[in-house]
Amino acid sequence: MDITIHTTFLPHTDPDASLAFYRDLLGFEVQGDVGQGDMRWLTFVSPAQPDVRLVLTPPAADPGVTEDERRTVLELMAKGAYQSIILATRDLDATFDRLQAADAEVASEPTEQPWGVRDCAFRDPAGNMVRIDEVR
C-alpha cells in the first residue's frame, strides 16, 4: 500500500493574521486564497514538502453546523483545544527565537519530552496549537 498525507485542515478566524503567521513568519508558500472577507480558504505548502497542503478554513463555512455548535468550536479554538498541527525543524532554538521575537503566542518553550522528542509550541492567530518538533 502506498498512502501519503496530501492535505490537512485547520480553522482560522482572521485570514490576514493567518497569512502573516503561516506565510510571513513560518515561511509557507500560498498556493491558494479563495473567497472574500472572513470566508476565505487559504492553502499553504512548505517549500520542503510541496505535495503536502495545509488548508485554513473558516469555521463558519459548514452549513450543517448550528449556531450553538459554531460558538462551541470558536470557544475551543480560543483555548487552543480544537485543532493542532505538528511541524518539524532542524533548528528548534532558532525557530523558537524567531517566532517569539515576532510576538507569536508561546504555549511552551523548547523542552525535552518524555516520549523522546524535543519540541516547543505556539498558538496561531486562531488559537490552534502549533507544535514544532526538532528533527535530529
Image (cartoon, grey):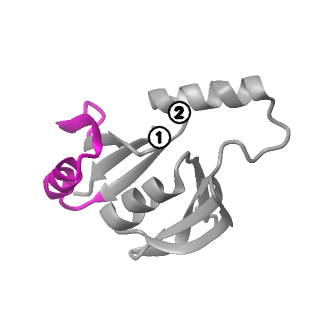
Range of magenta residues? 89-116
Foreground pick, 118 / 78:
78
Residue corresponding to mark 2:
77
The spot of residue 33 in percent (x, y) is 60, 70
25 lies left or right of 12: left
The C terminus lies in quadrant: bottom left
Residue corresponding to mark 1:
128
Task: Please say if 98 is above or below 126.
Answer: below
The spot of residue 69 in percent (x, y) is 73, 26
**Magenta highlight on residue 30:** no
The disc at residue 72 is: none
* Residue lying farthest to the front in this orientation: 37
Q: Secondary structure at mark 2?
A: helix
Q: Could you tell me if residue 4 is visible in this image?
A: no
Q: Residue at x 59, y 31 (%)?
A: 74
- Residue 24, quarter of the rendered image: bottom left
42 lies left or right of 88: right
Q: Residue at x 26, y 43 (%)?
A: 119
* Residue lying farthest to the right in this orientation: 64
What type is the residue that disc 2 sits on?
Answer: Met
Task: Please say if 75 is above or below 28.
Answer: above
Q: Secondary structure at mark 1?
A: loop
Q: For the image shown, how many numbered marks are present on the structure?
A: 2
The spot of residue 26 in percent (x, y) is 33, 62
